[in-house]
Amino acid sequence: MPDTSRLTPAGTSVPDHDPGHIPVMRAEVLEALSPRAGEVYVDGTFGGGGYTNAVLAAADCRVWGVDRDPDAIARGRALSAIWGNGEDGSQRLRLLQGGFGGMRDMLAAEGVTAVDGVMLDLGVSSFQIDDPERGFSFRADGPLDMRMERAGRSAADLVNSASEAELADIFHHYGEERHARRVARTIVAARTETPFSTTGQLAAAIRSAVPADRSGIDPATRSFQGLRIAVNDELGEIERALVQALDLLAPGGRLVVVSFHSLEDRLVKRAMADAAGRNAGVSRHDPRAFTGGAAEAGYALLTRKPLRPGDEECVRNPRARSARLRAIARLRPSTASSDAALTRTAASAAEGTEP
């Protein structure tokens, strides 16, 4: 990690991360993004500001923090005040409330049409999971809510009104629950007696329908995941965000994405491969497979396979265990040599060597 004392505002102490929030693969995200002075970045999933804090500490740059959760925006105001203005007099951290799937329009409204990097940390935040009142987790009983932006249809609304077939589809496709039909049938039968209103009530119903397995995972986990994804249209948001983030990148800009389950990672992998013009006809062991079409497509993959957190981080933060990081760069159009440099960087990342 860089020495941040030069960049930390005088008389203030900027923490590594907000208490209770541990940004996953922070060092790897920072290395892939490679922030530089004078550049502009977007943290599309601001959350607790962990990645933003690291980027602002690494260089005299600016960050736009985007989050659909009003609680995250409220937390960010304190961090924005701490970082203040940069050497050019502009505010170093500015906040935008809304889903990252609409980042392009939100930034355009502020006069920003291109940025030097975008970072996305997909899924639900630690703050949302750990607050029982938000209804994302069944570890403590709370209202069955799950709305990231505290508006619109709640999880309770969906559970109590959707048909058995609709619920089964949600649990199967978004939660990858093998017993989706049985869970849906159990919920529909139970809600005729008493509508669902709490996380504990729903978790108990799911556990009665799903047999425990040897993995030790709570039987309600997959169905809760599926319900959360449906309530927040998370996969739709990710698809929109990837298109817009790639479009926003200035030449040389980088998109870095951390995902936590296969549904997210598949979307990221496909979007990046398509953007880079990956040649499926070349052996996957040949660096040309992920850089061969890059010059024509305008992007170069910086990771052939997703990066994973180290053992030490997984011990320190168990939530990191399923994390995967992928990164892509927009090629510089000015000279052939600059394109070649990015291509060499991508090839070296894939082979695990220095460029």
Image: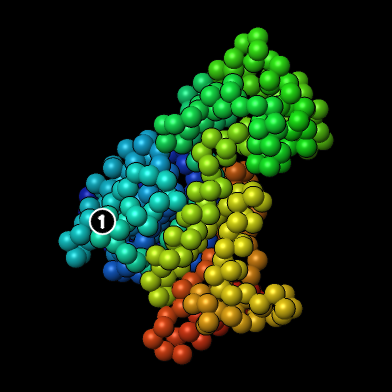
Would you name the residue on which mark 1 appears? 110
Measuring 65% from the left and 82% from the top, which residue is drawn there? 288
Residue 44 visible in image = yes
Q: Quadrant of residue 57?
A: bottom left
Q: Is residue 197 above or below residue 293?
A: above
Give the amino acid at mark 1.
Glu
Residue 289's spot in the image, x, y percent?
Answer: 66, 78
Measuring 53% from the left and 48% from the top, which residue is drawn there? 236
Q: Is residue 299 left or right of residue 172?
A: left
Q: Is residue 52 left or right of residue 273?
A: left
Residue 79's spot in the image, x, y percent?
Answer: 31, 46
Measuring 78% from the left and 32% from the top, which residue is drawn there? 179
Q: Quadrant of residue 68?
A: top left
Q: Is residue 349 left or right of residue 115?
A: right
Q: Is residue 119 above or below residue 150?
A: below
Residue 218's spot in the image, x, y percent?
Answer: 71, 30
The residue carrying pointer 1 sits among few (fewer than 14), some (14 to 19) or many (20 or more) residues within 10 Å by Cα, namely few
Q: Is residue 73 left or right of residue 32?
A: left
Q: Is residue 52 above or below residue 174?
A: below
Q: Nearer the viewer, residue 76 or 21?
A: 76
Q: Quadrant of residue 350?
A: bottom right
| Disc 1, SS | loop
Measuring 77% from the left and 27% from the top, which residue is drawn there? 182
Q: What is the quadrant of the N terminus in the image? A: bottom left
Residue 55's spot in the image, x, y percent?
Answer: 38, 59
Q: What is the quadrant of the C terminus in the image? A: bottom right
